[in-house]
Image (cartoon, rainbow, N blue to C red):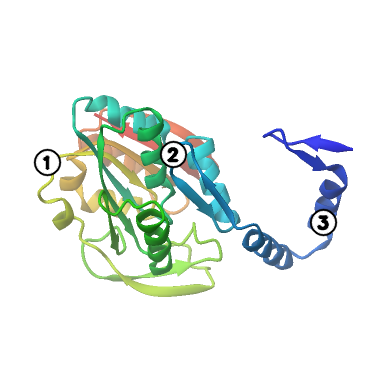
């Protein structure tokens, strides 16, 4: 007997039962180790119809890939950014908390698949984790040959100067200044974003997913945020004062807002002018 999955593939019911049994009897640490080995063995890669190549190395990346590419959690913000400047020759985006580059790749995929590739792309991606910087460089700049339109910078986002401890859990999508139970940590310098955008009169779309440092960023960069047409944040109610985040964004001139997802203490929050 087989069972169809969501993509029409057949999955053996015996395999499903064995998987369910394994989840019940194996310790969580062993299950994580087995899952990591499975992802290494699978070596998941796919080329989208747009020509964008995507590689998924572990379960955490699989979750983020589905949030961005399958569920389209940022699609409303991308569409709003394009609509807000229909005659602009290029789309200027900023990706804070860039991770391995899925958001940047999705924007490029969006432009190509909707036949708006005549719109150029100017993108700046910032990431605080050195290992993820190398993954971004490999997947976005090398494998997808996007170095002409995407610049990459390493540093923490929040304060405009200084150094802080970045805590790194096993799931590299959740490294944070505030999740202090993580098994490893590293000192990283803050990056002052102002010089990166000093000559830019506007930014069409800013995406910010910095695991609890959202309020620090919003408080310290009113000058940068006033250049932004559309901004989308992953807000963490358990890590910072998200109501204050919303109040400050309103003060900076973002008159429109929408909650695109609310799941526990996390929300995807979009604002525009």
Counting from the top left corner in percent of width and height, residue 246 is at 33, 39
Give the mark, 1 or 2, whose residue is nearer the N terminus.
1
Distance (Cα) linking label 3 and label 2: 33 Å
Distance (Cα) linking label 1 and label 3: 56 Å
As drawn, the label of residue 268 is: 2
Residue 26 placement, left or right of 219: right
Q: Secondary structure at mark 2?
A: strand
Q: Secondary structure at mark 3?
A: helix
Give the mark, 3 or 2, whose residue is nearer the N terminus.
3
Residue 87 visible at all: yes
Q: Residue at x 43, y 62 (%)?
A: 135
Counting from the top left corner in percent of width and height, residue 183 is at 54, 72
In the figure, 47 relative to 169: above or below?
Answer: above
Camera-side residue: 69 or 32? Answer: 69
Camera-side residue: 259 or 188? Answer: 188
Camera-side residue: 94 or 145? Answer: 145
Give the residue pinned by disc 1: 201
The nearer-to-camera label among 1 and 2 is 1
Give the residue pinned by disc 3: 24
Counting from the top left corner in percent of width and height, residue 191 is at 24, 63
In the figure, 186 relative to 194: above or below?
Answer: below
Q: Residue at x 60, y 58 (%)?
A: 43
Q: Residue at x 67, y 34 (%)?
A: 7
């Amino acid at each position: 007997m087989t069972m169809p999955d969501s993509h029409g593939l057949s999955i053996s019911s015996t395999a499903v039962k064995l998987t369910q049994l394994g989840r019940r009897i194996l310790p969580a640490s062993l299950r994580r180790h087995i899952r990591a080995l499975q992802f290494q063995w699978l070596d998941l890669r796919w080329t989208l119809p747009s020509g964008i190549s995507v590689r998924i190395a572990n379960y955490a990346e699989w979750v983020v890939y589905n949030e961005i590419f399958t569920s389209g959690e940022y699609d409303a913000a991308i569409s709003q950014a394009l609509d807000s400047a229909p005659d602009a020759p290029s789309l200027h985006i900023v990706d804070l908390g860039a991770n391995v580059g899925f958001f940047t790749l999705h924007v490029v995929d969006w432009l190509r698949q909707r036949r708006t590739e005549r719109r150029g792309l100017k993108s700046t991606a910032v990431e605080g984790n050195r290992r993820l910087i190398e993954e971004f460089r490999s997947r976005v700049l090398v494998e997808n040959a996007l170095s002409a339109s995407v610049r990459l910078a390493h540093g923490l986002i929040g304060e405009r100067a200084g150094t802080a401890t970045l805590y790194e859990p096993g799931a590299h999508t959740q490294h944070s200044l505030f999740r202090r139970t993580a098994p490893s940590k590293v000192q990283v310098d803050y990056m002052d974003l102002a010089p990166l955008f000093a000559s830019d009169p506007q930014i069409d779309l800013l995406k910010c997913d910095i695991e609890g440092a959202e309020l620090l960023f919003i408080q310290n960069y009113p000058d940068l945020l006033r250049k932004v047409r559309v901004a989308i944040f992953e807000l963490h109610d358990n890590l910072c004062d998200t109501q204050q985040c919303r109040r400050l964004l309103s003060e900076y001139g973002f008159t429109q807002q929408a909650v695109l997802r609310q799941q526990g203490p996390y929300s995807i929050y979009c604002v525009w002018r």
